[in-house]
Amino acid sequence: MAKVAIVMGSDSDMPIMKKAAEFLDQMGIDFEMTIISAHREPDIFFEWAKGAKDRGVKVIIAGAGKAAHLPGMCAALFPMPVIGIPMKTSDLGGVDSLYSIVQMPSGIPVATVAINGGLNAGILAAKILATSDEALLEKLEAYSEEMKQSVVAKAEKLDKVGYKDYE
């Protein structure tokens, strides 16, 4: 059973949403992924969101642009955590999406990552699941150590070659 559900309103969101999927894959977390428009097919959306808990979903990652109602509607129907990814838009650069997702009414929270923050959404979903999964927590700690070592190696390279030869 999928522990995380990834949903997007349009296939144009796929380049961002697949970053979450790739991280979940890397951590060995089962997930489902779909495209549903809350505005164009509300009946399908309601059925999907209301059924997520029964499918074993513990966290929903929802990406949306412009009016960006998808994450908030997920949070209204799904009783567990929802992570919203605001998509960068050509009209307002994603600020419209960010405001739509982050400004939820009291009682309907949506955890919100940065505009186009697909990777961070995947990491946050994994961290939520790791609160009750020691093996996953160990994988996340190893991931953090790898990031640290990458930065240490870059600093050592800079010290060795100097800024003029750093590539």
Image (tube, rainbow, N blue to C red):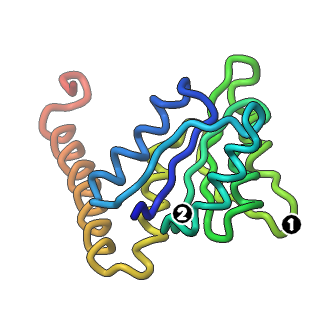
Residue at the disc numbered 2: 59
Residues packed near mark 2 inside 10 Å, few (<14), some (14 to 19) or many (20 plus): many
Q: Is 55 left, or right, of 167 in this rendering?
A: right
Secondary element at image label 1: loop
Q: x, y (%) of residue 145?
A: 25, 63
Ranked by sequence position, the earlier of labels 1 and 2 is: 2
Question: Where is 20 relative to 74, above or below?
Answer: above
Q: Is 82 left, or right, of 75 in this rendering?
A: left
In the displayed orientation, state which residue is furthest to the left.
160
Q: At 75% from the left edge and 18% from the top edge, which residue is drawn?
A: 91
| Amino acid bearing label 1 | Ser
Q: At 29% from the left edge and 59% from the top edge, which residue is drawn?
A: 27
- Which one is nearer the viewer's eye here, 43 or 67? 43
- Which one is nearer the viewer's eye here, 26 or 43? 43
Mark linked to residue 106: 1
| Amino acid bearing label 2 | Val
Q: x, y (%) of residue 89?
A: 67, 24
Q: Is 47 left, or right, of 117 in this rendering?
A: right
